[in-house]
Image (cartoon, rainbow, N blue to C red):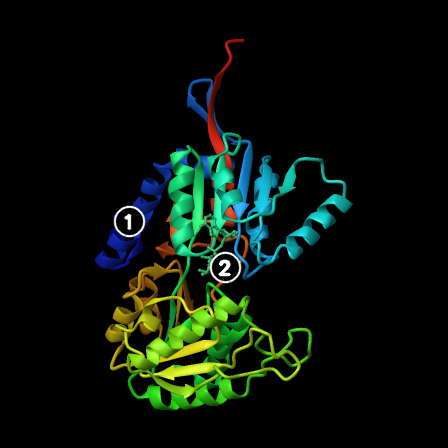
Amino acid sequence: MLVREHGKTLAEARGEVRRGIENVEVAAGIPNMLREGSGTVEDVAPGMDEAAIRQPLGTFAAVVPFNFPAMIPLWFLPYAVATGNTFVLKPSERVPMSSQLIFEAIDAVDFPDGVVNLVNGSADTVNAILEHDGIEGVSFVGSSAVARHVYETAAQHGKRVQAQGGAKNYVVVTESASLDDAVPNIIGSVYGNAGQRCLANDVVVGVGDVADDLRDRLVSAAEDLTVGNGREEGTDVGPLITPDSRERVLGMIADAVDEGAELLLDGRDFEHPDYPDGNFMGPTLLSGVTADMEIAQEEIFGPVLCFAETDDLDGAIEMVNSTRYGNASSIYTERGGEARRYKYEVDAGNVGVNVGVCAPMGFFHFGGRKESFFGDLHAQGEDAVAFYTDKTIAIERYYE
Ligand code: NAD
């Protein structure tokens, strides 16, 4: 009929009809589309409406790490109270002061008493929260071993849990990448926050011929970084959180050298003239890192870049996926095909293309995979709403 009355070809006519029928198929699912749009479906049967109502559950708690004392509490607190719950925050005992300040600000605006609560302490306090009958759910961010413990213990006590763990993030650079843009971006990702970031990409994999140039540029950019007091203008890298943390990082570097890595930049002996007792370390760069080394598998949490090489993208993706973590990973490339493959084949919750720190905005969820995350609903965005609420189905009909 289309060919007869319009004159188009048979193939064009078939295509047109197929696209028309597609709309009939989509419209056949209209109850779902209405529900997503308005939350209510009218007339599921004559005179009967059905809706899902989200309701708060009671009291939630969050246990948070040291490395982002102001931001991470706010991945949870605002969503928990905005959805109608009360909330308990347990900050890291290593950085209790920023949370104190946040709570003073909350007090200053006359927030209702008892809605948000600050509890300081360490493991014992966390365990009391995990076992407490009055707490409906727990959010956790920290190392994977503790994340697993929180997940298992809170679940045993009947609670909802979302537990974000540690990370080991790789960045892959292919021959098509723009190195002028990639290098400063990678340097920021590795050494920013002194490497104490769950999204730090601390292993850089140069693919094919790009490796030599990339390595040289990374070494010279890392050499230019200034280590010091974060309050002083021009400081790029501050101290590590504790002397133990510094010792742990120094130990990982020594082990990597024993396993065959080459130290192209050694920041281990850095001493700040004004703060000889500070936990400072200079930017460090290890080359010749391979997937079987501990430093390629475990989180460093210090200002250390590990440089590795592969012949092709297959080898790079295999290396990225070799760790037990799956928090984030980035590729630097100008080829869409490489970026697309990376996005689908890398087992990480956050994937960046020409982006060094792929931290999602608040309207998207944030969370990793494998041992970087225990649970199902992540922090932020729609997942936060689902985590902090339960859904009641209300089906209504009236006879008069
Ligand atoms: P941590 O695991 O030592 O401490 C986190 C929290 O757990 C603290 O509040 C601490 O008091 C508590 N805690 C510590 N040991 C405990 C135990 N045995 N039982 C119960 N509670 C315990 O972590 P950290 O050193 O403060 O933070 C660094 C870690 O956090 C890194 O592994 C980093 O990757 C991870 N992290 C992950 C994300 C993410 O989004 N996945 C974000 C930031 C940090």
Residue 134 image position (x, y, % from top left): 53, 30
In the image, residue 273 above or below residue 203: below
Task: Please tell me how crowded label 2 is: few (under 14), some (14-19), or many (20+) other residues with Cα within 10 Å.
Answer: few
Mark 2 to mark 1 CA distance (whole Å): 41 Å
Residue at x 47%, y 81% (from the top left corner): 268
Residue 101 image position (x, y, % from top left): 70, 53
Q: Given the image, on which type of amino acid does mark 2 rest?
A: Pro
Q: SS at mark 2?
A: loop
Q: Which residue is mark 2?
A: 360
Residue 266 image position (x, y, % from top left): 45, 85
Q: Quadrant of residue 10?
A: bottom left
State the mark number for residue 17.
1
Task: Please tell me how crowded label 1 is: few (under 14), some (14-19), or many (20+) other residues with Cα within 10 Å.
Answer: few
Among the two numbered marks 2 and 1 on one chain, the one whose residue lies closer to the N terminus: 1
Q: Nearer the viewer, residue 87 or 300?
A: 300
**Does mark 2 have its CB less than 8 Å from ligand 1?**
no
Residue 396 visible? The answer is: yes
Residue at x 71%, y 46% (from the top left corner): 106
